[in-house]
Amino acid sequence: MSVGAADWLPAATVMASGRPVLSAGEIERHLLPLVDLEPEENPRLAPLRGCLLVLTSHRLVFLHEASLSARALPLASIIHTYPPHRRHNHSPLRSLFSSSSSSSSSHHPRIRIQISLPLSRSEVVAVVVTCKADVDVFYGRLLEVIRTRAWEATASAAPASGAPVAEGAAPAEEDLAIRMPVVGVAGILRKEQETWESAGQNLQDAFQDLNALMSKAKEMMELAEKMRQKLLTNSSAQSNSNDEEMGSKQDLQDLLLSVGIVSPVTKETAGALYHQQLSRQLADFVRVPVERAGGMMALVDVYCLFNRARGTELISPEDLLQACSLWEKFDVPVMLRKFDSGVKVIQTKTHSDDEVFARISSLAQKPDALLKGISPSDAAFTLGIAPALAKEHLLNAENKGLLCRDVSPDGFRFYINLFNEIDLQNIHLPKTHGLYHTWISVATAAH
Amino acid sequence: MQRTVDFKLPHFFNYPPYFTLQPVRETREKQVQLWKELILDYCRSQKMYIISLEEDFPLFSNPKIERSLSYEAKEVFLAALVSEGRAEWIDKNHKKCLVLWLRIQDWANYILDFVKENGLEVTTIEDIRSGIETHGTELAGIDRGVLMRALRLLEQKGKAVIFKGSSADDEGVKFSV
């Protein structure tokens, strides 16, 4: 079932990986699988069933994963939220008054929300959680997000407005604190209470600073993105600048590009859906760097890059591996590949080994390479990839019979495979054409 | 052991991967074949019968490109000759190898032709190995063991009779051509 019927909510865009597209400054806060949305009063509004509910700082996104479609309920339109409750069977009065339409999900906890829809008066809808998730945690997050009003901060683009909660709450408590003389056990308790409260206050102040820092960080990221865009346009405009300059520009671009996943999937927000969502976010993230690296990247490199982009919410190598292995189940443009040697890489699905083989083959046929062979670092330099990866490519090419190896005190080198070029009937016969002939002429000139 | 000048090494002798045992099956098969051919050619031209894995053998290293075969590689190449009947291990530990650049059957035929050509119906083993007529033929300096096996093969076929000669270590052969 798609979400198309629920046209009373605005549609939300979804990436091919099955992750919602977040707007600037929007941060994912919590995820709940298998959620229904039921209008409680107005039967003309179609309900949503079996959606992944993504709570962001701006919206409630109801994502239907099978059809990759989604509807969003802007948090700005929420007038009031009611605490979650369960309709217990032992309460006959409740079941008597329960609406007939929701009988199927009557045992599941519901969070009723009063919203104001455009072109209509306010409606009451219920978020029905049909999975065994902790609804109270979700409700707490929801209240927190609504109180923070991050959508207003983005709309007005005012810095440091991310923490109105603390500002509003803190002074009130200070007014209430009446100084009492410190006497007896009660006095000690009071004293203890005061220290405790002031510690709490300090903490809140500290978090306020942190929030200010966070919103600044967001600006920094926007700045970085702007700079990158500018660099991109510059480098295409003056393509005749020298290599070194291009190289440093490239480095800078790499740096800027890796600044940031604004809303990293965390265990805290995603809960049981953690690996699945992480997998989707990773697929979105690695596509660009992998394509730029020539269609393949070592898993270790991806790990570093991904964690650097996440900044604080670092993931473990096991999480990364698990996220990669989940790709088989989704339709994403990247895949995990394991070489015979055990080295794991991420490559785009369009990546073809033949192209790499062609480049290695032409590299190995250069006069210098005919004579001295190529090392993994030579190949890495020419192909513009990591040496460990280059070695995998060379070993792969060897397996295909394209290259053969030379192990000597000088190291491990690869040569173009001449064995098949040599005539077994007459081993002394130098061919008058072909690869062996070319090699002989180069070799005799050198020795 | 000195490599004599009249053996021309093939070009691929200077190809470094030739000295590394190739791990990929197809490539290795080809490499092994090239080594078999070269070893047989070389032994024939140098009249060498015994290759010892633990002693220097001119073919097994190329100072020009600073490459030499590993022990394992030598073993693989010789074992390949053995499995084709072109060589035999002469000790249990597979350290020494008798190279048959002509198979025993071929040796027998060669001896028969040689005897016919030179009219040597009755001769001695020593004469076959180092007689005047032998000079310049494949038989010059033939390994005694190889020669005896070829002669015994002829004896089985009724083409020759080996008999005791005048001295203890000399035996005579009578061919029935």
Image (cartoon, coloured by chain):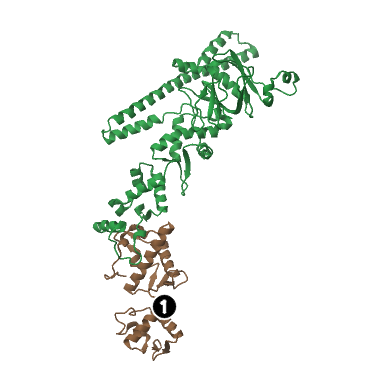
Chain colours: A green, B brown
Work out whether residue A122 can be spotted.
Answer: yes
**Type of amino acid under label 1:** Ile
Residue in the image at 57% along x and 30% along y: A271
Q: Nearer the viewer, residue A191 or B5?
A: B5
Q: Quadrant of the C terminus of chain A?
A: bottom left
Q: In the rendered view, would you say A131 is above or below A162?
A: below
Q: Which residue position is annotated with label 1?
A: B104
Q: Is residue A200 above or below residue A431?
A: above
Residue B56 shows in the view: no
Q: Position of residue A86 (x, y in %)?
A: 68, 22
State the quadrant of the N terminus of chain A. top right
**Residue A282, position as x, y percentages in the image:** 48, 34
Q: Quadrant of residue A428?
A: bottom left
Q: In this view, which residue lies farthest toward the bottom? A: B166
Q: Nearer the viewer, residue B51 or A444?
A: A444
**Residue pictured at 44% horizontal, 67% vertical:** B79
Nearer-the-camera pick, B160 or B63: B160
Where is A272 relative to B70, above or below? above
Name which residue lies at 56% across and 8% down. Answer: A175
Label 1: chain letter = B
Q: In the rendered picture of this protein, how many numbered marks are placed on residues? A: 1
Give SS at disc 1: helix
**Looking at the image, is A196 positioned above or below residue B145?**
above
Q: Is residue A430 left or right of residue A136?
A: left
**Quarter residue B13 falls in:** bottom left
Q: Quadrant of residue A276?
A: top right
Q: Is A179 on the left-hand or right-hand side of B125?
A: right
Q: Position of residue A43 (x, y in %)?
A: 63, 19
- In the rendered image, residue A12, in percent from the top left (x then y), is placed at 51, 24
Mark 1 surroundings within 10 Å by alpha-carbon count, few (fewer than 14), some (14 through 19), many (20 or more): many
